[in-house]
Image (cartoon, rainbow, N blue to C red):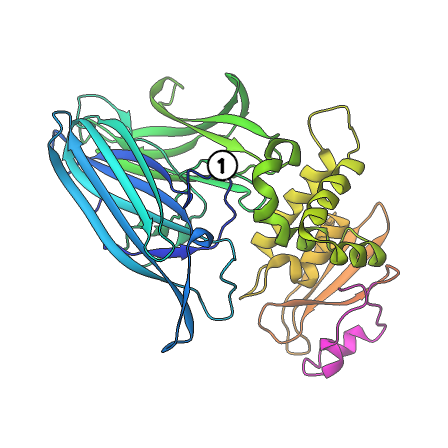
């Protein structure tokens, strides 16, 4: 079922945690049913830290360029080389992006082998900075053509976005950037996973796909089964938010059940949640410090924000930890409910209210959602000849309301009126929503920073 994709090398900006060596090389692998009996597809998932490379200014293009040399050697159990891959590729810093910005080089390499035991050596080298990194390990490819229902290995990913391309990062119409470390933090609050299911015949069956999360061998969270009719082979892309997970180690159990809830096959994959300082302080400081201001923006008073802006990097990190600790409603527990709630909102607005290149937290609706939480009721009004689309968010417990309008008809909802002190208050808002080109509507709203 696995397809051999056109190879592409993509730079994807992320915040990482685990570092293997000088270049931060991290490797994971997964196996899937091969094209014929006795064979399996092998996927090697890799991550390298771009900021660990040395870059030189290219005078012809005025861009900073580094050079990566990468090599994979795979031996059989007798020590014979059965396949290898190597290349040398420039790493170009996008225009106006700092050389030191934390970004990750993510890739997937695909091989087709007979089942059996193998040894792999992976080597990465910064040709300019003369830094290198290597990973070696043994692995075994199983036969997914056996006479029973089975589940492939599970691939963990940072993203799963629709794609019409056919690169090594694309599968079943989705582009998935792998997460070889299996670590999810403040910058990656949704865990995506991919797996395939194999059947020994072509009989159609009604099958339930069950995802369960375990912590210390205890069921932590379960999701309702997804029922499908399957035969021969099928695939699954799942995803769930880890915003409400306490920091720690977890196991994802992915299983197939029949209509009487009998388990037919299962596979598991470990992952780590590291959102809070006490679990990830040593590894998150330098990676996330530039994002701290964005997250804290609507929580700090003007003078507090000014104080934060004057701090050096180390002091900003300390400020971040102290802020969440000082606002922990139950400091005697392992969880910080205030942090979990706000980061869950942060994740939601960036997913729901993002528009074009504007992240959700920067939009009017994203800001209101972050500050006041989810509304109790949303009153929708569709586009009409006399006015653009608009809606009212009601917060009944505080008797608050916020009115948003799509002034240009592009789907960007702007706050035009509210009864909350400090927010936009315009008694002529009804007249203005019928005049979408009024320049007053595009002035910065009071309360926006």
* Quadrant housing residue 232: top left
Instruction: Give the residue drawn at x 62%, y 54%.
Output: 290
* Residue furthest front as drawn: 130
| Number of callouts | 1
Secondary structure category for the residue under label 1? strand
Q: Nearer the viewer, residue 132 or 322?
A: 132
Instruction: Give the residue drawn at x 45%, y 35%.
Output: 182
Tell me, yes or no, whether the highlighted magenta stretch contains residue 424: yes
- Give the magenta part as a residue range: 423-449
Q: Is residue 128 left or right of residue 5?
A: right
Instruction: Give the residue drawn at x 38%, y 42%.
Output: 25
Q: Nearer the viewer, residue 283 or 196?
A: 283
Residue 221 drawn above or below residue 296: above
Tell me, yes or no, whether the highlighted magenta stretch contains residue 51: no
Q: Is residue 100 left or right of residue 362?
A: left
Residue 230 in view here: no
The quadrant of the rendering that contains the N terminus is top left
| Residue 303 screen position, x and y as percent | 85, 57
What kind of secondary structure does the magenta stretch mostly adopt?
loop
Residue 403 in view here: yes
The residue tagged 1 is 183
Q: Determine crowd level at label 1: few under 14, some 14-19, many 20+ residues with C-alpha closer than 10 A.
A: many
Residue 117 drawn above or below residue 340: above
């Amino acid at each position: 079922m696995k397809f051999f994709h056109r190879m592409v090398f993509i730079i994807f900006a992320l915040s990482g945690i685990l570092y293997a060596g000088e270049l931060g090389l991290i490797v994971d692998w997964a196996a899937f049913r091969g094209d014929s009996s006795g064979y399996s597809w092998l996927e090697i998932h890799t991550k390298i830290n771009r900021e660990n490379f040395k870059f030189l200014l290219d005078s012809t293009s005025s861009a900073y360029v580094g050079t990566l040399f990468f090599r994979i050697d795979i031996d059989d159990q007798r020590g014979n080389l059965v396949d290898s891959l190597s290349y040398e590729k420039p790493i170009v810093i996008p225009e106006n992006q700092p050389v030191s910005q934390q970004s990750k080089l993510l890739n997937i390499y695909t091989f087709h082998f007979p089942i059996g035991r193998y040894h792999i050596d992976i080597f990465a080298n910064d040709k300019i900075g003369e830094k290198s990194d290597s990973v070696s390990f043994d692995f075994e490819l199983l036969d997914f053509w056996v006479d029973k229902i089975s589940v492939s290995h599970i691939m963990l990913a940072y993203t799963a976005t629709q794609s019409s391309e056919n690169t090594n990062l694309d599968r079943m119409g989705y582009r998935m950037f792998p997460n070889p470390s299996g670590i999810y933090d403040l910058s990656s609050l949704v865990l995506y996973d991919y797996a395939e299911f194999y059947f020994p015949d072509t009989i159609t069956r009604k099958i339930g796909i069950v995802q369960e999360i375990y912590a210390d061998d205890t069921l932590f969270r379960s999701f309702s089964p997804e029922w499908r009719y399957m035969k021969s082979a099928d695939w699954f892309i799942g995803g769930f938010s880890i915003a409400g997970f306490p920091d720690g180690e977890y196991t994802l159990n992915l299983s197939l059940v029949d209509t009487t809830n009998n388990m037919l096959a299962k596979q598991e994959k470990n992952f780590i949640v590291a959102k809070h300082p006490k679990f990830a302080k040593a590894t998150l400081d330098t990676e996330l410090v530039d994002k701290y201001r964005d997250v804290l923006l609507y929580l700090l008073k003007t003078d507090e924000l000014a104080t934060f802006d004057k701090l050096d990097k180390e002091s900003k990190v300390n400020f971040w930890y102290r802020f969440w600790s000082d606002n922990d409603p139950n400091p005697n527990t392992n969880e910080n409910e205030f942090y979990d709630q706000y980061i869950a909102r942060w994740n939601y607005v960036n997913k729901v209210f993002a528009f074009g290149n504007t992240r959700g937290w920067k939009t009017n609706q994203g800001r209101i959602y972050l500050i006041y939480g989810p509304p109790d009721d949303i009153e929708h009004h569709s586009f009409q000849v006399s006015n653009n689309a608009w809606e009212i968010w009601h917060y009944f417990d505080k008797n608050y309301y916020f009115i948003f309008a799509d002034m240009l008809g592009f789907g960007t909802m702007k706050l035009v009126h509210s009864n909350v002190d400090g927010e936009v208050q315009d008694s002529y808002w009804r007249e203005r929503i019928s005049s979408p080109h009024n320049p007053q509507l595009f002035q910065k709203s009071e309360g926006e920073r």
